[in-house]
Amino acid sequence: MRSSKSSRTDSVPDPQSSLDWAISVLTAGVDEAGRGPLAGPVVAAAVILDDLKPIKGLADSKILTALRREKLFDEIRSKALCCSIAEASVEEIEELNILQATMLAMRRAVEGLRLKPKLVLVDGNRLPVLSIRAEAIVKGDSKVPAISAASILAKVHRDRWCQAYDLEFPQYGFAKHKGYGTAEHLAALKAHGACPQHRKTFRPVAEVLS
Protein backbone atom coordinates (compact mmCIF):
# COMPACT_ATOMS: atom_id res chain seq x y z
CA MET A 1 0.00 0.00 0.00
CA ARG A 2 1.40 3.37 -1.03
CA SER A 3 0.17 6.88 -0.47
CA SER A 4 0.92 10.05 -2.33
CA LYS A 5 0.23 13.72 -2.10
CA SER A 6 -1.44 13.80 -5.51
CA SER A 7 -4.00 11.61 -7.22
CA ARG A 8 -2.97 8.77 -9.47
CA THR A 9 -4.74 10.33 -12.42
CA ASP A 10 -5.25 14.07 -12.96
CA SER A 11 -3.59 16.43 -10.52
CA VAL A 12 -5.55 19.44 -9.26
CA PRO A 13 -3.22 22.40 -8.67
CA ASP A 14 -5.85 24.86 -7.47
CA PRO A 15 -7.94 23.63 -4.49
CA GLN A 16 -10.59 26.33 -4.92
CA SER A 17 -11.10 25.59 -8.61
CA SER A 18 -11.49 21.90 -7.84
CA LEU A 19 -14.07 22.68 -5.17
CA ASP A 20 -15.99 24.83 -7.65
CA TRP A 21 -15.81 22.07 -10.24
CA ALA A 22 -16.98 19.51 -7.68
CA ILE A 23 -20.35 21.24 -7.45
CA SER A 24 -21.31 19.93 -10.86
CA VAL A 25 -20.03 16.34 -10.51
CA LEU A 26 -20.70 13.35 -8.31
CA THR A 27 -18.34 14.00 -5.42
CA ALA A 28 -17.50 11.84 -2.42
CA GLY A 29 -16.09 13.19 0.83
CA VAL A 30 -13.78 10.93 2.83
CA ASP A 31 -12.48 11.11 6.39
CA GLU A 32 -11.22 8.80 9.12
CA ALA A 33 -11.45 8.28 12.86
CA GLY A 34 -9.18 6.41 15.22
CA ARG A 35 -5.60 7.03 14.12
CA GLY A 36 -4.44 8.10 17.57
CA PRO A 37 -5.99 5.60 20.00
CA LEU A 38 -4.07 2.70 21.51
CA ALA A 39 -6.71 0.12 20.63
CA GLY A 40 -9.28 -0.86 18.04
CA PRO A 41 -9.59 -0.46 14.29
CA VAL A 42 -9.11 2.72 12.31
CA VAL A 43 -12.38 3.65 10.60
CA ALA A 44 -13.00 5.57 7.38
CA ALA A 45 -16.21 6.76 5.76
CA ALA A 46 -17.11 8.00 2.29
CA VAL A 47 -20.24 10.05 1.60
CA ILE A 48 -21.92 11.39 -1.52
CA LEU A 49 -24.49 13.97 -0.44
CA ASP A 50 -27.78 14.70 -2.20
CA ASP A 51 -28.11 18.39 -3.09
CA LEU A 52 -31.88 17.99 -3.06
CA LYS A 53 -31.82 16.81 0.57
CA PRO A 54 -29.65 19.32 2.45
CA ILE A 55 -28.44 18.50 5.94
CA LYS A 56 -28.11 21.37 8.39
CA GLY A 57 -25.32 21.54 10.92
CA LEU A 58 -22.65 19.51 9.17
CA ALA A 59 -19.26 20.26 10.70
CA ASP A 60 -16.03 18.66 11.82
CA SER A 61 -17.14 15.82 14.09
CA LYS A 62 -14.65 16.87 16.77
CA ILE A 63 -16.52 20.12 17.50
CA LEU A 64 -19.95 18.47 17.78
CA THR A 65 -21.42 16.93 20.91
CA ALA A 66 -21.88 13.17 21.01
CA LEU A 67 -25.67 13.60 20.92
CA ARG A 68 -25.50 15.89 17.90
CA ARG A 69 -23.20 13.45 16.09
CA GLU A 70 -25.62 10.60 16.74
CA LYS A 71 -28.54 12.58 15.31
CA LEU A 72 -26.54 13.65 12.26
CA PHE A 73 -25.33 10.07 11.75
CA ASP A 74 -28.91 8.89 11.23
CA GLU A 75 -29.78 11.91 9.05
CA ILE A 76 -26.73 11.41 6.84
CA ARG A 77 -27.52 7.73 6.40
CA SER A 78 -31.10 8.53 5.39
CA LYS A 79 -30.49 11.56 3.15
CA ALA A 80 -27.16 10.94 1.40
CA LEU A 81 -27.16 9.55 -2.12
CA CYS A 82 -24.91 6.82 -0.75
CA CYS A 83 -22.36 6.28 1.98
CA SER A 84 -19.91 3.63 3.05
CA ILE A 85 -18.05 2.86 6.28
CA ALA A 86 -14.95 0.66 6.34
CA GLU A 87 -12.27 -0.43 8.78
CA ALA A 88 -8.66 -1.53 8.92
CA SER A 89 -8.16 -3.98 11.76
CA VAL A 90 -5.64 -3.92 14.57
CA GLU A 91 -3.77 -6.71 12.78
CA GLU A 92 -3.58 -4.61 9.62
CA ILE A 93 -2.43 -1.58 11.62
CA GLU A 94 0.39 -3.63 13.11
CA GLU A 95 1.36 -5.13 9.76
CA LEU A 96 1.19 -1.97 7.63
CA ASN A 97 1.60 0.89 10.19
CA ILE A 98 -1.18 3.29 11.14
CA LEU A 99 -0.80 5.62 8.14
CA GLN A 100 -1.01 2.86 5.55
CA ALA A 101 -3.83 1.16 7.43
CA THR A 102 -5.72 4.47 7.36
CA MET A 103 -5.20 4.71 3.61
CA LEU A 104 -6.48 1.13 3.28
CA ALA A 105 -9.64 1.91 5.24
CA MET A 106 -10.23 5.01 3.11
CA ARG A 107 -9.83 3.04 -0.10
CA ARG A 108 -12.24 0.41 1.16
CA ALA A 109 -14.78 3.11 2.04
CA VAL A 110 -14.62 4.63 -1.45
CA GLU A 111 -14.80 1.23 -3.12
CA GLY A 112 -17.82 0.39 -0.97
CA LEU A 113 -19.94 3.23 -2.35
CA ARG A 114 -22.99 2.09 -4.32
CA LEU A 115 -22.42 4.92 -6.80
CA LYS A 116 -19.00 5.57 -8.31
CA PRO A 117 -17.98 9.20 -7.75
CA LYS A 118 -16.22 11.30 -10.37
CA LEU A 119 -14.17 13.10 -7.71
CA VAL A 120 -13.03 12.12 -4.23
CA LEU A 121 -12.15 14.81 -1.67
CA VAL A 122 -10.14 13.50 1.27
CA ASP A 123 -9.52 15.27 4.57
CA GLY A 124 -5.84 15.90 5.26
CA ASN A 125 -2.73 16.06 3.10
CA ARG A 126 -2.43 12.47 1.86
CA LEU A 127 -4.45 10.31 -0.48
CA PRO A 128 -5.17 6.60 -0.64
CA VAL A 129 -4.36 4.86 -3.90
CA LEU A 130 -7.51 5.22 -6.01
CA SER A 131 -8.49 4.82 -9.64
CA ILE A 132 -10.70 7.91 -9.33
CA ARG A 133 -9.68 11.56 -9.53
CA ALA A 134 -8.94 12.67 -5.97
CA GLU A 135 -7.69 15.62 -3.98
CA ALA A 136 -6.52 16.04 -0.40
CA ILE A 137 -8.06 19.01 1.43
CA VAL A 138 -6.32 20.19 4.60
CA LYS A 139 -8.98 20.80 7.27
CA GLY A 140 -11.51 19.53 4.75
CA ASP A 141 -13.80 18.34 7.54
CA SER A 142 -14.54 22.00 8.31
CA LYS A 143 -14.64 23.18 4.66
CA VAL A 144 -16.43 20.53 2.61
CA PRO A 145 -19.88 19.28 3.73
CA ALA A 146 -19.36 15.80 2.28
CA ILE A 147 -16.10 15.43 4.24
CA SER A 148 -17.84 16.72 7.38
CA ALA A 149 -20.50 14.07 6.88
CA ALA A 150 -17.83 11.40 6.44
CA SER A 151 -16.06 12.52 9.62
CA ILE A 152 -19.32 12.16 11.57
CA LEU A 153 -20.04 8.67 10.21
CA ALA A 154 -16.51 7.48 10.97
CA LYS A 155 -16.46 8.98 14.47
CA VAL A 156 -19.85 7.62 15.51
CA HIS A 157 -19.09 4.18 14.07
CA ARG A 158 -15.84 3.96 16.01
CA ASP A 159 -17.37 5.30 19.22
CA ARG A 160 -20.04 2.61 18.96
CA TRP A 161 -17.31 0.01 18.50
CA CYS A 162 -15.66 1.24 21.70
CA GLN A 163 -18.95 1.09 23.61
CA ALA A 164 -19.58 -2.47 22.45
CA TYR A 165 -16.04 -3.58 23.24
CA ASP A 166 -16.31 -2.01 26.68
CA LEU A 167 -18.95 -4.60 27.52
CA GLU A 168 -16.43 -7.36 26.83
CA PHE A 169 -13.46 -5.71 28.54
CA PRO A 170 -14.93 -3.24 31.06
CA GLN A 171 -11.68 -3.01 33.03
CA TYR A 172 -10.14 -0.70 30.40
CA GLY A 173 -12.87 1.95 30.20
CA PHE A 174 -13.16 2.05 26.39
CA ALA A 175 -16.64 3.59 26.50
CA LYS A 176 -15.19 6.60 28.31
CA HIS A 177 -11.83 7.30 26.70
CA LYS A 178 -12.52 5.65 23.30
CA GLY A 179 -9.11 3.99 23.30
CA TYR A 180 -7.00 7.13 23.65
CA GLY A 181 -3.99 7.12 25.94
CA THR A 182 -5.56 8.83 28.93
CA ALA A 183 -4.13 8.44 32.43
CA GLU A 184 -7.03 6.09 33.23
CA HIS A 185 -6.33 3.94 30.18
CA LEU A 186 -2.58 3.76 30.85
CA ALA A 187 -3.25 2.76 34.46
CA ALA A 188 -5.58 0.00 33.27
CA LEU A 189 -2.91 -1.21 30.84
CA LYS A 190 -0.38 -1.45 33.66
CA ALA A 191 -2.86 -3.23 35.91
CA HIS A 192 -4.34 -5.69 33.42
CA GLY A 193 -1.89 -5.88 30.52
CA ALA A 194 -3.07 -5.62 26.90
CA CYS A 195 -6.30 -7.04 25.53
CA PRO A 196 -6.61 -8.55 22.01
CA GLN A 197 -7.62 -5.18 20.50
CA HIS A 198 -4.68 -3.17 21.82
CA ARG A 199 -2.24 -1.96 19.17
CA LYS A 200 0.91 -3.67 20.34
CA THR A 201 3.17 -1.63 18.03
CA PHE A 202 2.11 1.63 19.71
CA ARG A 203 4.70 2.73 22.25
CA PRO A 204 2.57 2.89 25.45
CA VAL A 205 1.23 -0.60 24.78
CA ALA A 206 4.66 -1.97 23.81
CA GLU A 207 6.18 -0.55 27.00
CA VAL A 208 3.59 -2.33 29.14
CA LEU A 209 4.15 -5.62 27.32
CA SER A 210 7.92 -5.37 27.71
Image: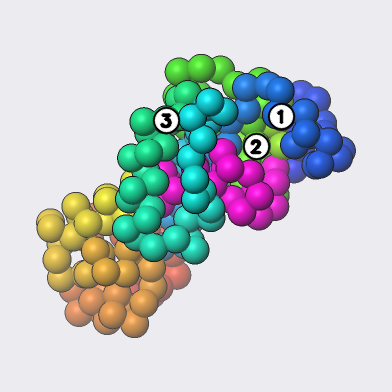
- Give neighbour class at mark 2: few <14, some 14-19, many 20+ (Cα, 10 Å): many
Q: Are marks 2 and 1 in contact (CB under 8 Å)?
A: yes
> Which residues fall within the magenta stretch?
136-156
Mark 2 vs mark 1, CA separation in Å: 9 Å
Q: Residue at x 14, y 66 (%)?
A: 170
Query: In the rendered structure, which disc, 3 or 1, sits on the residue that comes first in sequence?
Result: 1
Residue under numbered circle 2: 121
Q: Depth check: 36 or 148 in front? A: 148
Mark on residue 79? 3
Mark 2 vs mark 3, CA separation in Å: 19 Å
Amino acid carrying label 1: it is: Ala
Amino acid carrying label 3: it is: Lys
> Does 132 appear above or below 84?
above
Q: Residue at x 32, y 58 (%)?
A: 67
- Give neighbour class at mark 1: few <14, some 14-19, many 20+ (Cα, 10 Å): some
Mark on residue 22? 1
User: Horizontal placement of 22 versus 145: left or right?
Assistant: right
